[in-house]
Amino acid sequence: MLKWIVLALVLVPLVLLALSVRPVLARLPRLRRAALALQRRADEAAALREAAESLQQRAGGLQSRLETTQQRLTLIRARRGD
C-alpha cells in the first residue's frame, strides 16, 4: 500500500508538469517565427538608420557647398557692380 502512495506522489506531479508544459512546447514554433520576424525588422531598421545618417551627411555637405556657391555668387555680383 505504501508503494502505491509513493508512486502516486511521484507520478501525479510529473503528469501535471507534462500537461502544463505541453501548450508551451506547442507554441515554440510560432514564437521562433515571431523572433525571426522581429530580428529581420531590427536589421531593416538598422539599415534604414544607416541610410538616413548617410543622407544627413550628404545633406550637410550639400548645404556647405550651397553656402560656398552663394558666397562666390555674391563676390561675383559685387565685382560686376550688380
Image (cartoon, rainbow, N blue to C red):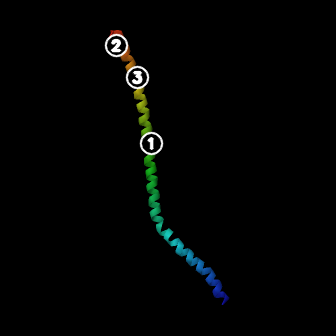
Q: Residue furthest right?
A: 2
Q: Are marks 1 and 2 in contact (CB under 8 Å)?
A: no
Could you say where residue 12 lies in the image, as x and y percent from the top left? 59, 80
The residue under the point 47% across, 69% down is 26
81 with respect to 28 (left or right): left
Query: Mark 2: which amino acid?
Result: Arg
The residue under the point 64% across, 86% down is 5
The residue carrying mark 1 is: 49
Q: CA distance from mark 3 to mark 1?
A: 27 Å
Mark 2 is surrounded, within 10 Å at the Cα level, by few (under 14), some (14 to 19) or many (20 or more) other residues, namely few
The circle drawn on residue 16 is none
Q: Are marks 3 and 2 in contact (CB under 8 Å)?
A: no
The residue carrying mark 3 is: 67
Foreground tag (1 vs 2) = 2
Element at badge 1?
A: helix
The residue carrying mark 2 is: 77
Location of residue 49 by image quarter: top left
Location of residue 80 by image quarter: top left
Query: Mark 3: which amino acid?
Result: Glu
Relative to 53, residue 8 above or below: below
Q: CA distance from mark 3 to mark 2?
A: 15 Å
Q: CA distance from mark 1 to mark 2?
A: 41 Å
Mark 3 is surrounded, within 10 Å at the Cα level, by few (under 14), some (14 to 19) or many (20 or more) other residues, namely few
13 with respect to 44 (left or right): right
Query: Mark 1: which amino acid?
Result: Arg
Q: Are marks 3 and 1 in contact (CB under 8 Å)?
A: no
Could you say where residue 32 lies in the image, as x and y percent from the top left? 47, 61
Relative to 47, residue 70 above or below: above
